[in-house]
């Protein structure tokens, strides 16, 4: 398997394995691993990065399963990730620098570029109508004298073409396939290119870290709060994630990216736009904290505020062009909101109302403290002895402070001035208590983040000096936000529901009551004319929906959708989060969808996705099998989108998992230890957790009336397909059932001591002609089984061709 876009992992120094518990102290996170997952985690250390493919090769593991495990552990803070890199990859590079009347800074930039430790590179300076002798300085610089720098003149003093267009002209003039960008007021460190270019062996675009140049109070502030600094940890670029874009002050990529996705012809947010469109076009865009460029920041407060206002105006432009559907939102606990409302009633009310508000707030606070304390104690009782009550209490304290800080900072940055104006007007109108209370809340919201940042980061500046830059930053930004709203005629970037979301008890109900209130990012998928929208909050969901081919499912979906007929009844066995159910439901005007999904979190997300797409499907939260019985499903606590739980016999779920280290009976009769099951069923590598579930035959669902007779069936059950098909014989034999799609997992069937060809034989015995419609890695295949019956009417889509089809 290619390492393209996969990356490498190592342990965080805060994570360690205690028995079968994986513990991270900051933040405090504990999860239980099965033997296989523990072995894989143990293959990593906290110094050297290793690729999932290398780790998988050391044992009988599936590379894709190891990738998913490491990605989940990375998302939960146990592992650190970086882009795959090849230090031997050092092709010639064209460095593009755009400039307009910034001779002094550009000269320092060229001096720094002259010190690069890289074998072959050229510098292309694009001068956009400068009048300060910039061109003369460039031609006289030692880089130009050595034939390593040249100037491209564009625009004029009166009509400059702008930053975005200048960068495009730089790409056109570049002599090499690898193109790097930096700005005139930047100073790349000597190892800049040597640390970033090797990442292009597995990625299309890479950006490095941007740090302040100098040691002024402004530099101390920007070192903590600069929007150009993407942080100390590498990450993939995700417009909806923590690292949403890469600044062109430190950007390296292949020419084909900038040819396919040129910079927009404007002076603001051109770098954000390019990154977002590159990601959408399918290019791998990543960030690494190496390859540092130092940036010269403005030092006077007025300039800081003006620069932040410019950045904020571009947020309005981006919101107009791209929307805010996938942006991050700050979570506000519903309990905190309710408590604040009761306190407000107590403070502003009179007589019995005020007393009632205070009493209710006090009662709620006591109840919440009791509930939280009980939960913490129960969790503490399950933690390893190496964690003390003090560790848990500290973790809870950090969580409270962090949540309060995040909410206060967002309020300060986006709403402090409007709220303060409301408070002032209320005070002036005679509502003194309301006005004073509102203004006091604004002061707290503004002051809390300053205090937290100064305490945590200990910048080399006085608290007063740091605070002044903080105010210039946030109030300058806020001015730009509302100026941008008028300029670009949109408020999408300042709508409260675009910035905040409710979390905690009642949050889902609130989300369901709001027709357009998406509390999590979404992805839209279109196949064969059918379009559906899916929530993608977990790393697994992002992994699935982040791939244009939907990890091999798109071709199968297209084949299935092209064969639907009006009035079809679709039975989706192993529905997961509803990829097939939603798209089929959207395609069928008058059909029926029945979705079978036993995994608790998958089933919950399935119901959300069905509701969001207006598909009135029937969801059955049970597993299908060969006979009616009880079973245990592994991976019950894994995030939505998990497609690899294993169905075990009921013995695995007894006594709170007391048999977890003993022999377990796998559905189908074979006896293997959990280690053997985990190692051989490598696609099932997951955090171990079990949930009891009912297992029923598909035929019994029809006999009980829970499902109508299906005409089209899809089965994807991770190695249990032979049992599922055996329990559906009467349903499949019925003349109405004309089409079946089934994913076959030979390796997992072998682990169950079942014949991989049993599925094909059973389908043929039921009257189907069986074809392989799609071959997948690790010997897996998707079968299409059809009965030779005449079509019942007009098809929903056009009959397509599927790749790698053969008759078995």
Image (tube, rainbow, N blue to C red):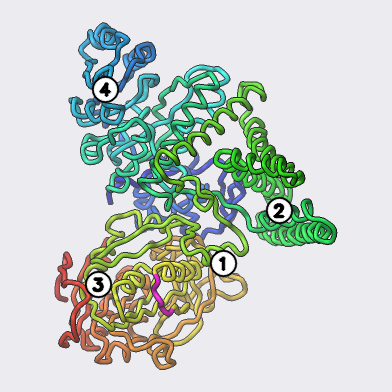
* Relative image position of residue 74 (x, y in whole percent): 47, 48
Q: Crowding at label 2, few (<14), some or many (≥20) Cα neighbours within 10 Å?
A: few
The stretch drawn in magenta includes residue 615: yes
| Mark 4 to mark 1 CA distance (whole Å) | 55 Å
Q: Residue at x 43, y 80 (%)?
A: 618
Per the image, the residue denoted by label 1 is 509
Q: Which stretch appears magenta?
A: 614-618
Q: Identify which residue, 146 or 688, lies in the foreground.
A: 146
Per the image, label 2 sits on a secondary structure element best described as helix
Measured as percent of width and height from the top left, residue 454 is found at 64, 30
Q: Are marks 1 and 3 in contact (CB under 8 Å)?
A: no
Q: Quadrant of residue 383?
A: bottom right
Q: Which residue is mark 3?
A: 561
Residue occupying the point 28% across, 39% down? 204
Mark 4 and mark 2 lie on one chain; the one further toward the N terminus is 4
The reply to whether residue 359 is visible in this rendering is: yes
Viewer-side label of 1, 3? 1
The quadrant the C terminus occupies is bottom left
Q: How many marks?
A: 4
Q: For mark 4, what is the residue?
A: 159
**Is disc 4 in contact with disc 1, using a CB cutoff of under 8 Å?**
no
Residue under numbered circle 2: 340
| Badge 4 density bin: few <14, some 14–19, many ≥20, Cα 10 Å | few
Q: Secondary structure at mark 4?
A: loop
Label 1: state its secondary structure: helix
In the image, is residue 368 above or below residue 94? below
Of callouts 2 and 3, which one flags the residue occurring earlier in the amino acid sequence? 2
**Label 1 vs label 3: CA separation?**
33 Å
């Amino acid at each position: 398997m290619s390492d393209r876009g996969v990356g490498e992992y190592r342990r965080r120094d805060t994570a360690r394995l205690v028995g079968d518990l994986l513990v991270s102290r900051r933040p405090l996170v504990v999860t239980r691993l099965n033997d296989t997952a523990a072995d894989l985690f143990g293959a990593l250390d906290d110094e050297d990065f290793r690729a999932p493919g290398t780790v998988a090769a050391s044992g009988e593991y599936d590379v894709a399963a190891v990738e998913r495990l490491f990605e989940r552990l990375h998302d939960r803070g146990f592992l650190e990730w970086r882009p795959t890199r090849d230090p031997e990859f050092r092709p010639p590079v064209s460095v593009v620098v755009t400039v307009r009347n910034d001779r002094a800074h550009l000269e320092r930039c060229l001096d720094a570029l002259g010190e690069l430790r890289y074998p072959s590179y050229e510098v292309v300076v694009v001068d956009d109508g400068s009048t300060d002798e910039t061109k003369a300085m460039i031609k006289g610089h030692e880089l130009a004298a050595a034939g390593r720098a040249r100037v491209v003149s564009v625009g004029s003093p009166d009509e400059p073409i702008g930053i975005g267009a200048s960068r495009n002209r730089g790409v056109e003039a570049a002599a090499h396939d690898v193109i790097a960008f930096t700005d005139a007021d930047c100073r790349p460190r000597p190892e800049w290119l040597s640390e970033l270019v090797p990442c292009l062996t597995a990625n299309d675009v890479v950006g490095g870290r941007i740090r302040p140049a100098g040691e002024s109070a402004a530099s101390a502030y920007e070192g903590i709060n600069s929007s150009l600094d993407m942080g100390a940890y590498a990450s993939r670029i995700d417009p909806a994630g923590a690292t949403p874009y890469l600044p062109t002050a430190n950007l390296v990529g292949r020419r084909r990216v900038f040819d396919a996705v040129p910079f927009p012809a404007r002076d603001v947010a051109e770098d954000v736009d390019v990154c977002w469109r590159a990601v959408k076009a399918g290019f791998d865009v990543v960030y690494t904290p190496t390859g540092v460029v130092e940036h010269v920041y403005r030092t006077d407060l007025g300039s800081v505020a003006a620069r932040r206002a410019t950045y904020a105006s571009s947020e309005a432009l981006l919101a107009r062009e791209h929307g805010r559907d996938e942006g991050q939102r700050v979570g506000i606990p519903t309990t905190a909101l309710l408590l604040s409302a009761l306190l407000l009633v107590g403070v502003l009310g009179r007589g019995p109302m005020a007393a009632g508000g205070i009493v209710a707030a006090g009662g709620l606070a006591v109840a919440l403290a009791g509930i939280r304390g009980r939960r913490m104690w129960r969790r503490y009782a399950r933690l390893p002895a190496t964690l003390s009550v003090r560790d848990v209490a500290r973790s809870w304290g950090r969580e409270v402070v962090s949540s309060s800080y995040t909410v206060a900072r967002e309020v300060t940055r986006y709403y402090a001035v409007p709220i303060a104006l409301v408070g002032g007007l209320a005070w002036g109108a005679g509502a003194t208590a309301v006005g004073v209370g509102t203004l006091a809340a604004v002061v707290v919201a503004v002051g809390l983040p300053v205090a937290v940042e100064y305490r945590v980061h200990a910048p080399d500046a006085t608290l007063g000096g740091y605070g002044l830059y903080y105010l210039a930053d946030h109030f300058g930004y806020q001015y730009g936000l509302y100026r941008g709203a008028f300029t670009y005629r949109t408020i999408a970037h300042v709508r409260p529901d675009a910035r905040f979301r409710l979390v905690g008890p009642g949050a889902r109900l609130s989300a369901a009551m709001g027709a357009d209130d998406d509390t999590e990012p979404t992805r839209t998928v279109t196949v064969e004319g059918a379009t559906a929208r899916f929530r993608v909050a977990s790393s697994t969901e992002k992994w699935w929906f982040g791939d244009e081919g939907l990890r091999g499912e798109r071709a199968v979906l297209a084949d299935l959708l092209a064969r639907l007929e009006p009035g079809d009844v679709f039975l989706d066995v192993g529905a997961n989060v509803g990829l097939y159910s939603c798209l089929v439901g959207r395609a069928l005007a008058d059909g029926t969808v029945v979705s079978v999904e036993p995994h608790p979190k998958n089933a919950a997300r399935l119901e959300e996705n069905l509701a969001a797409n207006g598909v009135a499907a029937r969801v059955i939260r049970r597993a299908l099998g060969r006979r009616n019985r009880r079973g245990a499903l592994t991976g019950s606590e894994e995030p939505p989108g998990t497609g690899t739980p294993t169905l075990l016999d009921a013995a695995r779920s007894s006594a709170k998992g007391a048999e977890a280290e003993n022999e377990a009976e796998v559905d189908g009769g074979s006896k293997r230890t959990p280690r053997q099951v985990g190692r051989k069923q490598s696609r099932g590598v997951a955090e171990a957790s079990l949930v009891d579930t009912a297992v029923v035959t598909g035929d019994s669902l029809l006999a009980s009336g829970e499902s109508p007779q299906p005409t089209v069936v899809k089965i994807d059950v991770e190695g249990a397909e032979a049992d599922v098909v055996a329990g559906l014989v009467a349903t499949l034999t019925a003349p109405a059932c004309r089409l079946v799609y089934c994913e076959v997992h030979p390796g997992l069937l072998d682990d169950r001591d079942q014949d991989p060809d049993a599925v094909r034989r059973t389908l043929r015995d039921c009257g189907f002609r069986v074809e392989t419609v799609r071959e997948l890695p690790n010997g897996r295949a998707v079968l299409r089984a059809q009965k030779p019956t005449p079509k019942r009417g007009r098809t929903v889509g056009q009959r397509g061709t599927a790749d790698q089809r053969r008759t078995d």
